[in-house]
Image (cartoon, rainbow, N blue to C red):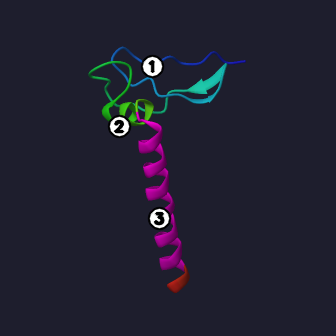
Amino acid sequence: MKAPVMPKAGQCKWTEGDSGSYTFPCTNRAENGSYCEYHRTIVYETPEQRKARAEEMRAANAAANKKRIAA
């Protein structure tokens, strides 16, 4: 099995995949801590914020699907 490539110093440490088989797809700089600004908002959000973000994504997906059907 190929060893995972660790992020470079100062790179966002946002991971994807399973333990032992993960990647670091985000190449943004991590200025304050381990994550870039975008991923830090996800990691440190409250349950209420997470629920609101999920509802926004559902609404955006529904609107995109409605446009596709109408086209």
Q: Nearer the viewer, residue 13 or 2?
A: 13
Q: In this view, does 16 lie above or below 48?
A: above
Amino acid type shown at disc 1: Pro
Which residue lies under the disc numbered 3? 59
Residue 17 is one of the magenta-drawn residues: no
Quadrant for residue 29, please give it: top left
> Which sits in the foreground, 30 or 3?
30
Left or right for 34, reference 70: left
The answer to whether mark 3 and mark 2 are in CB contact below 8 A is no
Q: Residues within 10 Å of mark 1 (few under 14, many from 20)?
A: some
Where residue 55 appears, x then y in whole percent?
A: 48, 56
Q: Which is more N-terminal, label 2 or label 3?
A: 2
Disc nearer the start of the sequence (1/2): 1
**For the residues marked 3 and 1, what is the alpha-carbon distance in whole angstroms?**
34 Å
Kindly identify the residue that appears in the image at 53 percent across and 72 percent down.
Answer: 65
Q: Is residue 63 magenta?
A: yes
In the image, what residue type sits under mark 2?
A: Tyr
Looking at the rendering, the stretch of residues picked out in magenta corresponds to: 45-68
Q: Is mark 3 on a helix, strand or loop?
A: helix
For disc 1, the marked residue is 7
Q: Find residue 63 and report its horizontal and vertical position in percent.
A: 46, 72
Q: Position of residue 59 (x, y in %)?
A: 47, 64
Q: Name the disc covering residue 38, or none.
A: 2
Q: Return the x and y of residue 31 as percentages of the image width and height.
A: 26, 22
Say which label, 3 or 1, has the lower sequence index: 1
